[in-house]
Amino acid sequence: MTVERGDFSASFNFNGDLTLIDAGGIQVTQFRPGIHDRPLAGLWLRRHREGRIDSIQLTGSGSRASFDPAVGSPVWEGRDMGVRWWVRLVPSAISPALSLALPSGGEGGGTGRGASWTWEVSVTIDQGGLTSGIERQECDDAVLPDDLWDLVSAQDLALVEPSTAAGAESYISQYIAYHVQGVPNFGNVLSARQTMGCAPRLPLYVTGIIQGCRAFMTDGYDFYGLGARLGGQPEALGDADWDRGGIDQYEFAMACLLSPKAPLTQGGLTWQVWNTAMSDYRGDLGKACTACAGASEESLSGADWTEADDGPSIGPHDTSPVSPAASQVESATSLLISSALLNGDPLPEGEFSRLGGGSVRQPEADQTGHLLSYFGDDACHVVSRRKELEVARSHGQILLSGNPDTDPSRPTMAATTYAGGVFASQVVLGNTNMNQLVSVQKTGLGLLRSRGVRILVQVDGTWRLLGVPSAYIMDLGGSRWVYRLGDRSLTVSTIAHLDGAAIDIHLEADGPIRALLTVSLEDPSIWLRKFAPADVARGMGGSISFTPAPGSPAAERCPGLSYVISSPDARAGDDGPLFDPGEGVRTTDPAMVTFLSDGGRALSVTIAGFMDGASEESKPDAVPATSERKLLHAHYLAMASFMQGLHVAGEGRFAEFNDLMPWLVQNALVHFLSPHGLEQYGGAAWGTRDVCQGPLELALTFGHTDLARTILLKVFTHQNPDGSLPQWFMFDQYADLYQHDSHGDIPVWPLLALAEYFEAGGRLDLLDEPVAFWRDDATRPSSGPLTVADHLARTLDYIQSHRVPDTDLFCYGEGDWDDTLQPAQESMKRQMASTWTIALLYQACCGLQPLLEAAGRTDLASRFAGEAGRIKADFADNFIFQGVLAGYVNFVDGQPRPVIHPSDTRTGIRYRLIPMTRSIIAGLLTPDQEADHERIIEGNLHYPDGVRLMDRPASFHDGVTRVFKRAEQAANVGREIGLMYTHAHVRYTEALGLLGRTRLGQELLRISPVGQFRRLPTSEPRQRNCYFASSDADFPDRYTAASQWSRLKEGAKDPVGVRGGWRIYSSGPGIYCRQVVQHLFGLQLRDGRVVFDPVLSQEDDGMEVTMTLFGQPRTIRYHVAGGPVAGPGDTGSEGTGSDRLRVEADGRRLEGRILDLPYRKGGLEVTQGQLADAAHIDIFLAVDGQTVK
């Protein structure tokens, strides 16, 4: 049902759960729970008695209330804890007083669109008044004279257009800024502004309690607490005064209010929680709080809500019974809502330590010595229940199936699992946005129980929903959950097939058990489903097939796409089994299907995907439980094969790479083949910048040049005729979907990628490969006799036609690598140049020029040489001021003015990392300039958890922009806003490798999640087998971060904690693997050649690494000494020739070419023939341990 009044609209499920509030076209609420989910928002009544707090939910399926969907003003009524309550929702228009206080239009005004609504709550003593006497002191269903009562209100927030609210809830929350204003008679009034999702509009939400608000919270993680994963009530309900409350700008936006405590007398208690939302308000948030509070008080003062129009006359003293219709609604509750969670018991340490197959590597223990997690056989990661309850981001992984050859033209199946009993979610074949079948688990606390694949089991006649296990085991190809339940146990496994696109979900118990597996669809409207009946008696289970609905995107692009969910031992059906048959309620929710077993020891379900239609012959067989270990090992072997068998022997400091690298490669392949992550579950496209880094560098690192060639051809296919490229594009059947504009650096990346491909031994004939430009009008490649070489020329044309006026510099355009620093003013796009982009362009031109010469493309080579020469000639004059690189230069009146520089008073930011590291990598600085900037980085940008993008964050003004967009919009201190973006730290290590700095290994380990807990005291608990895109300072808001930034630095007296950012979806894993293999271990594979150029320290002396070179496994032994290897000469990073490096193959000294690098002599290049069939390679390396002084 829907309630509408003016710009206000609210929707409810039949059981009284609020699913949506819209005000003036802005979706106020963030999550839209279905009929199988409890709402995340709500109202709670609390009773304080002798130090104990009891609470009851007043509305929705989580309460004991009946629901009367009265026209205009729905009402909830219930009885519990000796009281009777009524709740009514009363919508209204924006009051005239508020319109005058916050006038529409103009600077600081609103748009005039919006709405107000009030939650009216009335509580009376039920049947008989106050209770006294010792005999009633322990009675929960009685009201005692000393009892105190208060009200809790919680509302999840999005404040964006409905189409935006459908995805990326964490991202939406990061851009909601809060302000709290103390208002006389109201106490705390809370305002929230969405700063990004509707930009340039800034939607506003303000809420308060007429009777006063004594405490508040702004994030659901604080309100619910991590313990919510166990199924209990929100932790805030048990916190008497919300001492942990306050503003917290994290990733679960929720406006939570707490009223003052009051006794309940015969006159009852009344609260009015008022809310106002406006579609655009750019003024002062404190003024908005005061104005909205005054308007609400005026509109509600003296009003008798029992006599409101369009509603029933139910009031605080009404004793009429609940209507039959309401009674039916009250009882019709899904098992996914009503069932208690069944969580695993903690395991004895001996049993827990055996779950990894026998190995216990890289153990993590708590302060009492209890084992929390470890790595086992085949790099599996084993996590305890205790560890899962300590991490903010629930342990999870993305499984890949059906593409062992890593061919991007072959659709890959993906499935996401989470520790808290989410046995699969976001199951999709191919495009992760358009082809998705199974729904996404959208909360890190598992609060939406219907999402994904869940399993209920019947224990002592009562259905229980499997929750947090005793242990969660992540293998490269599967997930396992182990539940110890007293003297019983059961396990669940989700295993991805290696060849076919399918996953198996298998439950096995130690005795007979009834089980009900549920699968929810993300969008049932785009699928046609067909049931095949089960015949369990004959050994034939049920199945459900799904094909694209006519008119859906998948029907147009992938007409043969289909999914089949089948079981050999369960009956397939709709959501009927989730309701008690005696209730007579069948919702036939099209988003839910079920598989019900009859009480055996096992339940198996397979989800398979097909691009050419499904048939009985094509359906994959489920993998028997006895073969699961073999299949998981096959996944590990496939990953090891892609990595050329890379392995570090012994137990030295780099031994943790044996557990880290397989997971980073797996994460990199997710980013490449099935673009999405755990928090950032949307994707489906290749970012032009990203695919030219992570996937391409990963391929080149391990010698897969054909794969790199495929990437390059797909990128150039999407180039526009004017030489520009899209910011992102879909690379599959949806290739006509892409972002038409892009940041200024985007055209440079294919140039650099091509140069690196050729340098790694890629065939030069790629230049002659026919590749057309993309026809925007026809949404497909154009035709014509064009080659990759033509694309290079056209790219250079574009660059040279987009200059800063009166200069030879490529202009800033829409931004550069740091997405948060997009220009807020139109003039900046044309007048500014990015130092980092110019350095990147110089590196690309220098890399391409000799290779084009070698390919006989002398004219094109000359053009690139000319571009590089012009950059080099004027680089110091244009970008270095007072000896320091500017982050940008802004040309005003023809003169360059530095932006982000010690002399920049406008931004107040002095140093920017990536222009420095990229200029070092590109070789643009003189040795003295390089040393100066290395000192700047170490002294101003280096922190215990990694280097930061700038020395301080951009200014924040409640989301109103002045210089940069996202940097001044985001309210959360995370991702790029927190400045420690892991990708940039990896590029910093690349600079260290090229400089030959022996601290390279230390800096790579600094960001390894495997052992970070040992090295970084401020590291908050986090998952250890995945890539984190950032390290986020645990500041509650931007203002606190700005004033307390020094708490992040080394040696801080009161250090702030750092938590892991978003996971998996990044180009970072691929480039990290490159730094480990090519720069740390010094193994640079090229076509028929290899360069040995390790950068190690003396503590790595004696290390052995195994890796396949030219098809043969080789053991590389490193001998690291503090002096020259042989003969006179310089030592260490500046050594020359054989005095620094000697390589022997089976005892034979190898001669070859010593490469030149910008700041030192490089490695030794030898041929495949020189290595012959040598099994052992010894590398003798001299280092001097130079560090910046």
Image (cartoon, rainbow, N blue to C red):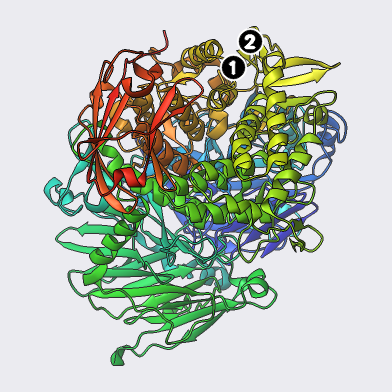
What's the mark number on residue 902?
2
Residue 936 is at least partly visible in this image: yes
Q: Which image quarter is the N terminus in?
A: bottom right
Relative to residue 360, is residue 664 drawn left or right?
right
- Residue at screen point 73% across, 50% down: 790
Residue count near mark 2 (Cα–Cα under 10 Å), binned few <14, some 14–19, many ≥20? some
Relative to 644, 66 lies left or right: right
Comes first in the chain, label 1 or label 2: 2
Query: What type is the residue that disc 1 sits on?
Result: Tyr
Question: Relative to residue 603, is residue 11 depicted above or below?
Answer: above
Tell me where residue 1036 appears, x and y as whole percent: 51, 28
Residue 844 lies in what quarter of the image?
A: top right
x, y percent for residue 508: 24, 69
Q: Nearer the viewer, residue 77 or 972?
A: 972
Q: Nearer the viewer, residue 69 or 677?
A: 677
Circle number at residue 1167: none
> What x and y, as percent, mark residue 1135?
37, 18
Q: State the separation of the CA atoms marked 1 and 2.
A: 7 Å
Give the quarter of the image for residue 301.
top right
* Residues at discs 1 and 2 in contact (Cβ within 8 Å): yes
Identify which amino acid the numbered label 2 is placed on.
Pro
Q: What element does badge 1 sit on?
A: loop
Judging depth in this view, the residue of 307 and 753 nearest the camera is 753
Give residue 1185's position: percent from left, percent from top. Answer: 32, 15
Is 246 situated above or below 611? above
Q: Quadrant of the C terminus?
A: top left
Q: What residue does disc 1 label?
A: 911
Secondary structure state at the residue bearing disc 2: loop
State the residue at coordinates (28%, 69%): 507
**Which residue is pictured at 54% across the width and 73% down the height?**
589
Q: Residues within 10 Å of mark 1 (few under 14, many from 20)?
A: many
